[in-house]
Image: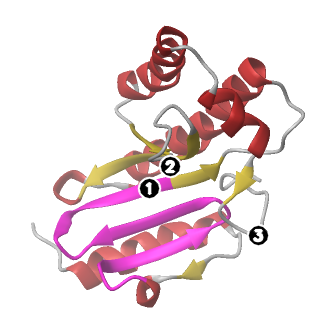
Amino acid sequence: MNKTPDQIKNIVEDWIKIVGKPYEDVTKKDPNFGFGFKMGDIVIYSMKNRADRVTVETFFGFASEHKTATANLGDKEWQEFAVSIGEPLSLANLSLIIGQEQSNPKQINHMFINGYVDVESMNREKFFRVWDAVANFRQITIKKIQIKFGVKGAMESGSNTSSPSMYG
């Protein structure tokens, strides 16, 4: 049974309310959103041109020390680092987008991790599994970066809260 985009938005918002944490409706902030909600470092949205899926996404910027460190890696070491970050995400059916500096493509400025739930088969369990995976891999990825380059620099968050998941 097909649901309208408004019905999907209402279902997702009801599930977000279950968590009992503050969230923001960011639908009007991006003209491409069919709908969008932000809770901590997690954004849950559906694009107008992809109404068949609900995406769960997190963003984090690199600390200046980490940006410099990635820019100074050798080619092979940079590739190994990128694979060590991306491979587990791929195995978990999550996507990774690496924001690189145009003048030095090895300099990583930020990353997006996202997963999605197909609207046709969406249920509460699948939705929260994707949410958990995105939130958990965010923390794992940050720890890998800190292990590789040191914990001196703090990761830059895309939001004003440090709550990376529904549990924070």
Judged from the image, the secondary structure of the residue bearing numbered disc 2 is: helix
Q: Is residue 71 left or right of residue 146?
A: left
Residue 123 sits in quarter: bottom left
- Residue 120 coordinates in the image, percent (x, y): 16, 57
Q: Nearer the viewer, residue 41 or 125?
A: 41
Mark 2 or mark 1, whichever is nearer to me: 1
Mark 3 or mark 1, whichever is nearer to me: 3
Q: Residue at x 76, y 70 (%)?
A: 160
Whether residue 133 is situated above or below residue 76 in the rendered picture: below
Between marks 3 and 2, how big is the CA–CA gap? 19 Å
Q: Residue at x 36, y 79 (%)?
A: 35
Q: Which residues are magenta?
A: 30-57
Determine whether label 3 and label 1 are within 8 Å by CB.
no
Q: Amino acid at mark 3?
A: Asn
Whether residue 18 is situated above or below residue 143 in the rendered picture: below
Mark 3 or mark 2, whichever is nearer to me: 3
Q: Is residue 159 left or right of residue 31?
A: right
Does the magenta run of residues contain 42?
A: yes
Determine whether label 2 and label 1 are within 8 Å by CB.
yes
The residue identified by callout 3 is: 160
Residue 46 sits in quarter: bottom left
The tag on residue 56 is 1
- Residue occupying the far bottom of the picture: 28
Between marks 3 and 1, how big is the CA–CA gap? 18 Å
Q: Amino acid at mark 2?
A: Trp
Whether residue 114 is situated above or below residue 93 in the rendered picture: below
